[in-house]
């Protein structure tokens, strides 16, 4: 009996210790952490020369007794073309003892002088090592006679919704300030191609931009970048670019002074349920290729209408994931790309190019036109191309397809965004140059038991796929 009682007391003690440990995950105070990492956080002041050419001075009525006074004042203090200085404030953090500093690109963009103020009060001028507008990250460098206190990046993928975080920076120009909160959401996208934001309710205001978001170990898991606010102040919805995105950018800026992202060379869109049905895909996943300009993908044999389902061993869920995994791949690397084409999968080897060198890639050309004919099909009135339509739409002479001249506003085609002036290039992943071509693809899809037909449509040069439901035959 006594042994059982001792055993029970031991178990109770272990449970009590576990409860205490769990309770301690919420800190009683952030003071020790703030004291330890504050010396690595900096305030940033930028200065920009702004020309005043053509900027009018104060208007004084002609003949006024103050006319001569104002004229003399303007001549002495400004002159007709004297530039003025514009200043902005932001935050940043030191990542190495030899003076590399991370901040937001928008904090230092256009600046001709950048001054770093340290927690100790020391001020040093910084040079811009490199910037990446795509992720809004910039890398600066200062020269210091003594080693600088610095912080390290943590693994942002381990941050969980509900974890405690602490933001530091220079909000509203008030100097070094600390705010605390939790991770409110993960994997947020705002407007950038490579967005991967951590959302937090830790107070972030203007001037916090470029400052660090810390976990409770004192590791940087994000760079404070933006807020969602109707009034310009914090309402508890702030966004920090995830550290696993930032570290890749910083490494490249430190090594090359610029980013070097992998480039596949395709235009893509997400696959919806109707498109999946039209293609015979089991699930609405992957990235649909809408166009293949000259580049790595074309050389490897990727075609418009292919659905990329795997890239370099990673299953592709949607376009956003594909863009990020390609961008994170080394330039010049040969990768396996699996595509779904004509009901089967194919594996292609692609040697990646560099995205920064390919921003102006020209879309691939397509075959020539057929004679003009007009007809209403699937809620749209279509016509083959003629010289008049080419001129109206500003189309290249090598462009072919069927022009949408009208759309029934009660039709599914209208609901899915088709409009007059759109150019239908493909139907059922086959090029169409005549009404008969389109009718043949409709009949083929119906014979195969498909409920919808996939159209490749261009509008002002931009391609996208639209799946339209077929009528019962």
Image (cartoon, helix red, strand yellow):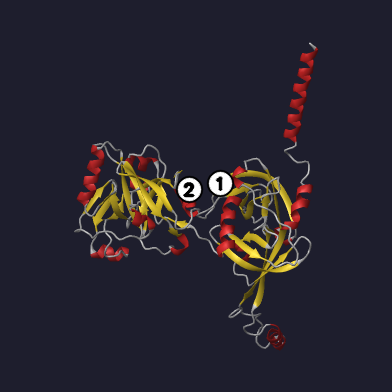
For the residue pair 370 and 72, the one nearer the viewer reads as: 370
Residue most extreme to the right: 2
Q: Which residue is mark 2?
A: 321
Mark nearer the viewer, 1 or 2: 2
Q: Write the residue at 63% across / 72% down.
A: 112
Q: Is residue 184 visible?
A: yes
Q: Which residue is mark 1?
A: 187
Q: Residues within 10 Å of mark 1 (few under 14, many from 20)?
A: few
Image x and y of residue 297, in percent: 37, 55
Image quadrant holding the N terminus, namely: top right
Q: Earlier in the sequence, mark 1 or mark 2?
A: 1
Q: Residues within 10 Å of mark 2 (few under 14, many from 20)?
A: some
- Residue 284, by quadrant, is top left
For the residue pair 264 and 46, the one nearer the viewer reads as: 264
Q: Write the residue at 64% across / 56% down.
A: 232
For the residue pair 94 and 428, the one nearer the viewer reads as: 94
- Residue 148, by quadrant, is bottom right
Image x and y of residue 55, in percent: 60, 78
């Amino acid at each position: 009996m006594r042994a059982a009682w001792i055993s029970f007391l031991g178990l109770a003690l272990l449970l009590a210790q576990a409860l205490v440990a769990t309770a301690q995950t919420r800190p009683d105070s952030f003071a020790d952490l703030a004291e330890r990492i504050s010396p690595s956080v900096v305030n940033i002041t930028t200065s920009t020369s702004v020309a005043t050419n053509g900027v009018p001075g104060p208007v004084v009525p002609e003949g006024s007794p103050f006319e001569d006074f104002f004229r003399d004042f303007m001549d002495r203090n400004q002159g007709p073309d004297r530039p003025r200085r514009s200043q902005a404030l932001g935050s940043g953090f030191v990542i190495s003892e030899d003076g590399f500093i991370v901040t937001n690109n928008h904090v230092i963009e256009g600046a001709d002088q950048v001054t770093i103020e340290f927690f100790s009060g020391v001020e040093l001028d910084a040079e811009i090592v490199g910037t990446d507008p795509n992720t809004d990250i910039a890398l600066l460098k200062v020269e210091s006679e003594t080693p600088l206190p610095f912080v390290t990046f943590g693994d942002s993928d381990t941050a969980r919704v509900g974890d405690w975080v602490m933001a530091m920076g220079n909000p509203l120009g008030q100097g070094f300030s600390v705010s605390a909160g939790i991770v409110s959401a993960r994997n947020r996208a705002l407007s950038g191609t490579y967005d991967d934001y951590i959302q937090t309710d830790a107070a972030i205001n203007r001037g916090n931009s470029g400052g660090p978001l810390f976990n409770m170990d004192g590791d940087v898991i994000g760079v404070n970048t933006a807020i969602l606010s109707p009034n310009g102040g914090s309402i508890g919805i702030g966004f920090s670019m995830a550290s696993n995105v930032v570290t890749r950018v910083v490494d490249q800026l430190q090594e090359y002074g610029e980013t070097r992202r992998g480039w596949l060379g395709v235009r893509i869109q997400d696959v919806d349920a109707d498109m999946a049905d039209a293609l015979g895909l089991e699930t609405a996943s992957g990235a649909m290729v809408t166009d293949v300009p000259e580049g790595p993908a074309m050389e490897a044999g990727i075609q418009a209408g292919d659905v990329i389902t795997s890239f370099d061993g990673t299953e592709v869920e949607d376009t956003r994931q594909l863009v990020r995994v390609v961008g994170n791949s080394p330039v010049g690397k040969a990768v396996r790309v699996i595509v779904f084409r004509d009901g089967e999968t194919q594996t292609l080897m692609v040697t990646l190019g560099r995205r920064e060198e390919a921003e102006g890639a020209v879309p691939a050309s397509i075959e020539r036109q057929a004679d003009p004919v007009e007809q209403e099909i699937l809620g749209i009135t279509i016509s083959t191309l003629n010289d008049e339509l080419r001129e109206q739409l500003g189309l290249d002479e090598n462009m072919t397809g069927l022009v949408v001249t009208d759309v029934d506003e009660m039709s599914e085609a209208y609901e899915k965004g088709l409009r007059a002036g759109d150019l239908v290039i493909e139907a059922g992943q086959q090029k169409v140059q005549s009404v008969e071509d389109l009718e043949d693809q409709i009949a083929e899809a119906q014979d195969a038991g498909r409920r919808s037909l996939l159209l490749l449509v261009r509008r002002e040069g931009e391609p996208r796929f639209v799946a339209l439901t077929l009528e019962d035959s």
